């Protein structure tokens, strides 16, 4: 019997939620079913709410900092869930993973130096590279028999051609849902070490792994990787805490860590949000049972979506996800332009998805669907899509 109410439909309207309250700002209608941005429609574990309520009862909300108990909670989580151990001094806090990536780009490269990403990929990667005046090098993942793989020869060719200084890894990969195997990561890591390329590894989706797959913390595979890595993590995806702005970077190399810290200090950012460390610590200390049950629910949502598409929208192909709650879905069989596809989905189906082209040209004809919602909401959205595409 379920201990948690993942089927509960929670009205998020009028909470200033970007996902639902700013439809018109983004050119959408008010009655859209929002399945785009990567946050979940589930209430957080009670332990988090209780911890925040307890702190709220103290009437002063001044400057704060986390203590050793917070660090130990993060260390324990990483060791229990991912078999990775880091030292206290390796941890830097940032208000978000994207912020951390931007700081690492500044610390590890000079203006006009090259940074490589693997497209289609989370769109802030390219934005952070370009906004910080670096050269963007796109390495395309290869869709092979319904599964994306890395083209190592092309990676090496581009590193040499463009003198790439930094490689940004998305692991697990957003949006294609790959959980990279140990063999894949070692082949990549050895290649990057051979060419003296530093690595920024965005591992924010690491806690969403489905049966038959295992997340490998890149820094934990070999010391020579760890010594050139900035590992980016956060409780925000796992426990739906994005609004509390708390992320953790692990940096073993003293020089790299000092450089990243210096870039953070240049922005004026210092103390974390008061409630961020409280929520994170409560989640890591007491949220494990909630997460385990959530993973089962999400796996059921994936199977529900897969079966629905096969029965009602056979032209649409689901890229089988190995991790994350974001599904990468191929609509190319309809032969529609990106503009026409987005128009059909948003105006006729009244469903708000992330357009594939946002993740790079390799995403043309694709859509990203967030299935971290109640089964009823998911079913309604899928029915709307099927009706909009019926011929």
Image (tube, helix red, strand yellow):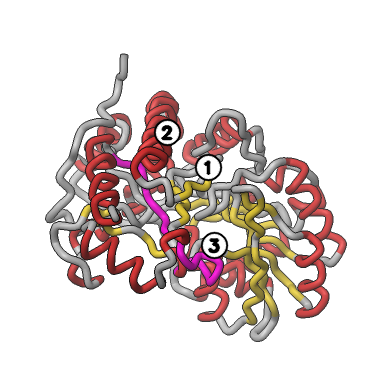
Residue 379 position in % (x across, y down): 26, 39
Task: State the residue at coordinates (26%, 63%).
Answer: 346
Is residue 102 visible in the rendered structure shown here?
Answer: no
Whether residue 53 is visible, yes or no, is yes
Quarter holding the N terminus is: top left
Query: Disc 2 marks which residue?
Result: 303
- The percent coordinates of residue 359 (x first, y second) are 49, 66
Instruction: Tell me the mark number nearer the camera, choosing from 3 and 1.
Output: 1
Between residue 355 and residue 289, name the one nearer to us. Answer: 355
- Magenta residues span 358-373
Q: Residues within 10 Å of mark 2 (few under 14, many from 20)?
A: few
Q: Is residue 363 magenta?
A: yes
Q: CA distance from mark 3 to mark 1?
A: 16 Å
Q: Residues within 10 Å of mark 1 (few under 14, many from 20)?
A: some
Residue in the picture at 81% in, 71% down:
157
Q: Earlier in the sequence, mark 1 or mark 2?
A: 2
> Which numbered tag is attached to residue 373?
none
């Amino acid at each position: 019997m379920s201990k948690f109410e993942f089927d509960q439909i929670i009205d998020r309207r009028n909470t200033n939620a970007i996902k639902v309250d700013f439809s018109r700002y983004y050119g959408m209608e008010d009655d859209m079913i929002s399945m785009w941005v990567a946050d979940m429609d589930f209430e957080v574990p009670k332990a988090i709410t209780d911890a925040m309520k307890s702190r709220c009862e103290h009437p002063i909300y001044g400057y704060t900092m986390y203590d050793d108990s917070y660090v130990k909670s993060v260390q324990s989580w990483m060791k229990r869930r991912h078999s990775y151990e880091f030292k206290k001094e390796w941890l830097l806090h940032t208000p978000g993973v994207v912020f951390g990536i931007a700081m690492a780009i500044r610390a590890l490269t000079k203006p006009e130096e090259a940074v490589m990403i693997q497209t289609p990929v989370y769109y802030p990667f390219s934005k952070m590279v370009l906004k910080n005046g670096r050269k963007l090098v796109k390495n395309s993942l290869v869709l092979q028999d319904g599964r994306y793989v890395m083209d190592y020869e092309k990676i090496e060719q581009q590193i040499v051609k463009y003198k790439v200084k930094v490689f940004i890894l998305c692991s697990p990969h957003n949006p294609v849902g790959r959980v990279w195997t140990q063999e894949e990561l070692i082949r990549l890591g050895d290649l990057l070490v051979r060419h003296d390329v530093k690595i920024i590894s965005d591992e924010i989706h690491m806690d969403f792994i489905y049966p038959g797959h295992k997340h490998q913390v890149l820094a934990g595979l070999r010391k020579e990787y760890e010594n050139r890595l900035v590992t980016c993590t956060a409780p925000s995806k796992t426990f739906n805490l994005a609004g509390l702005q708390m992320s953790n970077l692990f940096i073993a190399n003293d020089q790299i860590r000092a450089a990243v810290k210096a870039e953070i200090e240049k922005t004026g950012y210092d103390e974390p949000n008061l409630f961020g460390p409280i929520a994170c610590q409560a989640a890591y200390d007491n949220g494990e049972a909630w997460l385990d049950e959530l993973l089962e629910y999400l796996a059921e949502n994936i199977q529900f979506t897969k079966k629905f598409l096969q029965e009602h929208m056979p032209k649409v192909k689901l890229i089988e996800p190995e991790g994350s709650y974001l599904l990468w879905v191929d609509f190319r069989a309809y032969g529609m332009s990106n503009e026409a596809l987005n128009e059909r989905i948003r105006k006729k189906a009244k469903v708000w998805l992330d357009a594939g082209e946002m993740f790079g040209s390799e995403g043309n004809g694709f859509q990203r669907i967030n299935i971290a919602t109640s089964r009823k909401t998911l079913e309604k959205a899928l029915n709307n899509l099927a009706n909009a595409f019926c011929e």
